[in-house]
């Protein structure tokens, strides 16, 4: 797995997260083409931190609430895990 840091602008991100059945970090289900982070965050990425705060143990719903609460920030740092070799 490769750790990636993505800096997102204010506003909606246009991503959908799923909570895996077998626990583990929430998975990006899809990224809208109009998303400001399209091409930098991909389906299958695991969201592990927001602004360096560990969110790997939270549900997708709780993470969505955090992202919404921080949507007015100038920037949000998303840390994701990506499987090696995924383009």
Image (cartoon, rainbow, N blue to C red):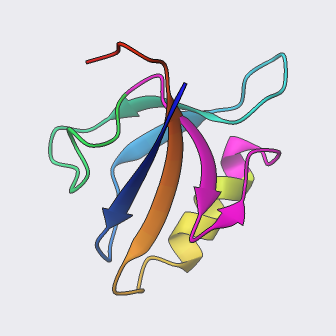
In this view of the protein, which residue sits in the foreground, 84 or 64?
84
Q: Residue furthest left?
A: 34
Residue at image point 73% right, 54% down: 55
Q: Position of residue 73 (x, y in %)?
A: 42, 86
Q: Classify residue 11 as left or right of residue 5.
A: left
Boundaries of the magenta span: 43-61
In this view of the protein, which residue sits in the foreground, 42 or 83?
83
Residue at image point 52% right, 78% down: 70
Q: Quadrant of residue 65?
A: bottom right
Looking at the image, is 4 positioned above or below residue 68?
above
Looking at the image, is 13 positioned above or below residue 66?
above
Q: Position of residue 28 (x, y in %)?
A: 49, 33
Q: Quadrant of residue 6?
A: bottom left
Looking at the image, is 1 positioned above or below residue 76?
above
Q: Position of residue 27 (x, y in %)?
A: 58, 30
Looking at the image, is 61 positioned above or below residue 20?
below
Please check the rendered image and state whether residue 42 is part of the magenta-colored stretch, yes or no.
Answer: no
Residue at image point 57% right, 78% down: 69
Image quarter in which the C terminus is found: top left
Residue at image point 34% right, 15% down: 86
In this view of the protein, which residue sits in the foreground, 31 or 7?
7
Image quarter in which the N terminus is found: top right
Q: Classify residue 22 as left or right of residue 75.
A: right
Please check the rendered image and state whether residue 49 is part of the magenta-colored stretch, yes or no.
Answer: yes
Q: Position of residue 50 (x, y in %)?
A: 58, 63
Tally of numbered discs: 0
């Amino acid at each position: 797995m490769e750790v990636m840091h993505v800096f997102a602008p204010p506003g909606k991100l246009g991503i959908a997260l799923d909570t895996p059945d077998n626990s583990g970090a929430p998975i990006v289900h899809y990224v809208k083409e109009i998303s400001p982070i399209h091409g930098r965050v991909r389906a299958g990425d695991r969201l592990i931190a927001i602004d360096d705060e560990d969110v790997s143990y939270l549900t997708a719903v709780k993470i969505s609430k955090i992202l919404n609460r921080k949507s007015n920030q100038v920037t949000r740092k998303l840390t994701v895990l990506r499987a090696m070799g995924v383009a």
